[in-house]
Each structure stands twice: as structure tokens, then as C-alpha cells.
Amino acid sequence: MCVLRKLIDKYKNIPLPARASFWFLICGILQNGLQVITLPIFTRLLTIEQYGLSSTYFAWNDLVVVICTLRLSYGVFSNGLLKYEDKKDYFEAAIMGLTTTVSAIMLILFLIFHQAVQSLFDMSFILCFTLFACQICSPAMLFWTVRNKFEYQYQKFTIVTIVLSVGTTLLNLVAVLYFDYDHGIVKILSYQIVWTAIYLVFYIRIFYHGKTFYDGEIWKYALKFNLPLIPYFLSTIVLDKADRIMIGEFCGQEMVALYSVSYNLGRLMVLLTSAVDNTFTPWAYQKMKEKNYGNIKNVSLTIMIGFLGAATCFMLFAPELIMIFADSKYSIAVYVIPPVVGSYFFTMLYNLVSKVEFYLEKTKMVAIITVSAAVLNIVLNYIAIPRFGYVSAGYTTLISNIVMAIFHMIYSRYLSRNVMRYVKTFYWKHLLGLSAGMIVITVLVSLFYDKLLFRYCIIFTGFIIIIMNRQKFVIMFRMMKDK
């Protein structure tokens, strides 16, 4: 009891922002984890073509969200909570009114030109209709989420997130199990219907408390802030989703399913990147403020070495992961995992080095680099997918992320030299060496998928190396904790 009481007292003494960040991270891990946990169930309940349709639908959904809502829940909403601090409810309702108006206009345009949209999306009217109609209410929960994070209301947020995430996932599974209809369509429609009902509750709540719909000043402020960011928002979605849309166009829904299963498994690495980035970001900002760059160099290098090891083990264990998380008919998709996991290595890399850009508020180049990488990704997909099939989409994504990482490294190094006065913020040569190693491993690892003993020997050796160097990782996390 004494030990438990000490732990409780220690937890209570943790600063509110730190406690809130921890629980927000847990909720993020849960939401991503549920997608992976349900993967073996859905891949067995749905045919390959049905799973491919579902994956393509939600890829289009992410693009439609940006167009219909202008992603006002990102950027301007957080800033507006500060700007209109004395009337947050009013501001939230006015922003909700703006997203409602834009979404309604887009829905009307869809109804007028629905045949062209159906042809572009290659989906039925009802599926296309839900893509647009559901966006009217969907930002409401995002606004609620951002506001809870802004105000450190982690207890309410955690309970609601856990209940809704688990509950909606179970309802989605029940619908697929018990409705005797195309399981792909049932999965999509049950998801949208359940979540739209939930969004509607938050939607009504916002207008009830805010008691407004239109405010010219707030609408003008929001549009001026977010409209220039739309190309950036679209580019980030394109980098993550365009491959599935283009695979569906060139190769069919079955190939989308094969690609999506491996891509979703690769997203397990997101749990690692998110956890590290959420811890590293505030710590790195504090160290840059203190001009303590030595710790940043050492910690960032240790992170990337650890990530290289984790990514390599993940790639080597890919055939077994496919067996565990998907039906045997998806086994051929194992060759997508190496480039996807390699892409997350470079995502982690540019997330780390770009902290210099964000700290110095030199973010214009961030948008330019992201848009350029998105255009490159589309061009490479257009060239590669028809010629080399769906697996090539993984490598086009890898190349695009490599290009992003290189340009972020160049720009961050430029800022370190010219703005921070020749400060060496990172071990640039070491990071380049690790990057080269990651590329070689990504290209070669799939050659050993039929050599079980060899792969297990490498994985075992990797674990031994990690255990032998565990103290270095402990020291690194203690450094970030004791900021």
C-alpha cells in the first residue's frame, strides 16, 4: 500500500501539462492500436476486393475532409482560442458555422456534378454522398478535441476517447458480422453512420453554448489564416494516401487491399515515432532556448540509431507479422513492408531536424518542401505503378520521404549556420550515414524472407546489441525527462 501511495503522490506532483501530454499520447496509441488489432478480423471477414474498396474510400475521405472543412481544426483554431480567449464558445460556434457553410456548398456541388465525381472516385452514389454529407458535422469533435488539449482537460478527454474508440470499433465489427450484404460497403456505411451520430452530439453542443453561426470578423480571420495552408494540408494527405487511390485506378481494388494491409502494419512504427516526437519536441525547444545544443546532437543521434534497429527488426519479422495480422491470401504483400517502414525512418529523421525550422518560425520552406514532395510522389506513382505494380508505390513513397528528409536537413543546417551563428545542432554526417544504411537494408532485406534461420539470427543479434547498450537509451530518456 505504501508503494502504491507513493506512486499516486508522485503522479499527483507531475505538472498538469506533462500529465495531460501523457494521457493524450495514450489515447493516440489506443486509436492507432485499434486499427492494427482489428486488422486480422477485417482481413478475414472481407474479401480482398471489399477490403480494397474500404481502403480506397477512406483515402478519398481524407482528401475530401480538407476540401470541405478547410481543416480549420488545425492551425487557426488553436490560435483563435488565444485570440478570443474571453469568448471561446462564441468563437468555436462561429468557426463551426464556417465549416458547415463550406461543407454544405461542397455537398450541393457534388449533387449537381455527382456523375463526374462518381466517375473520378469510381464509387457508387451513396458512398460518394456520405463522403461529402458526413463532413458537415465531423469537425465538431475535432474542435472539442483541440479545445480539451488546449485547456489540459485530459480526464474527460481520455474517458470519452476510450469509450468512443472501443465502442465504435465493436459496432463496426457487429455490423459487418450480422448484416447480410457486401461487407466492404457495410464496413464503410456503419462506420460513417455511427460516427456521424456522435459528431452530431458535439455539433449541437457547440451551437448551444456558442449561440452564433456567423461572425464576419472571425470568418475573415479564419479564412485568411487557413486558406494559404490548404496546399500544405493536401500535400500531406497526398503523401500518405495518393498511392492507394492510384493503385485502385491502375491495378484494381484487390491490389489496393494487398498494399493497404502491409501499409497498415507498417503504421505500427507510427506508435514509436509519435511517442518519441511528443517527448523530443518540447525538450528540444527548451534546449535550443538554453543554447544547449550538445544534448540535442547526442539524443537525436541515439534516437535515429535506435529507430534504425527497430525498423530493421520490423522488416525482418514482416512475414510473421503478415501471418499474424492478415489472412494467408495477403502473404504476397509482405514486400510492401520494407519501403513503408523505411519511409517512417525518414519521416522520423525530418521530424527531428525540422525542429530548428519550427523553433525559429521559418515554416514557409516546410510547406514548399511538402508540396514538392507530394508532386514528386504523384509523378513517380504515375510512372511506376502501371509498369511495376502496386509494390512500387511503397518505393515511390520512400523516395519522396528521402527527398523531404534531405531538403529539411539542408535547410535546417543553413538556419543553424546563418541564423543560429554556425551552431552544429545535429551530427549531420552521422545522420547521413544512418540514412544510407537504412536505404541499403530496405532494398536488401526482402531477399532474405525465405531464409527463416538467417532472419532470426539477425533479429536475435539485434536484441543482444540493444540489451548491451540499454544504458545509453535509459540515459537519453532521463535527459529528456529531466528537462
Image (cartoon, helix red, strand yellow):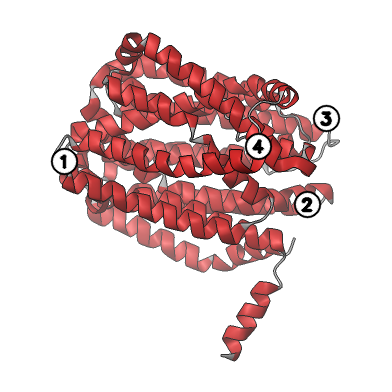
Question: Which sits earlier in the primary sequence, circle 2 or circle 4?
Answer: 4
Q: Which residue is mark 2?
A: 287
Q: Which residue is mark 3?
A: 418
Residue 291 in percent (x, y) is at: 84, 48
Q: Residue furthest bottom?
A: 2
Residue 395 in percent (x, y) is at: 39, 29
Badge 3 density bin: few <14, some 14–19, many ≥20, Cα 10 Å? few
Badge 1 density bin: few <14, some 14–19, many ≥20, Cα 10 Å? some
**Residue drawn 36% across and 49% down?**
168
SS at mark 4 in the image: loop
**Residue 115 shows in the view:** yes
Tell me the CA gap for discs 2 and 3.
Answer: 19 Å
Tell me the CA gap for discs 3 and 1.
Answer: 54 Å
Q: Which residue is mark 4?
A: 211
The N terminus lies in quadrant: bottom right
Question: Which sits earlier in the primary sequence, circle 3 or circle 1?
Answer: 1
Tell me the CA gap for discs 2 and 1.
Answer: 50 Å
Check whether the beta carbons of the residues at disc 2 and disc 3 lie within 8 A of each other.
no
SS at mark 3 in the image: helix
**Residue drawn 30% across and 35% down?**
189
Check whether the beta carbons of the residues at disc 2 and disc 1 lie within 8 A of each other.
no
Q: Nearer the viewer, mark 2 or mark 3?
A: 2
Q: Which residue is mark 1?
A: 329
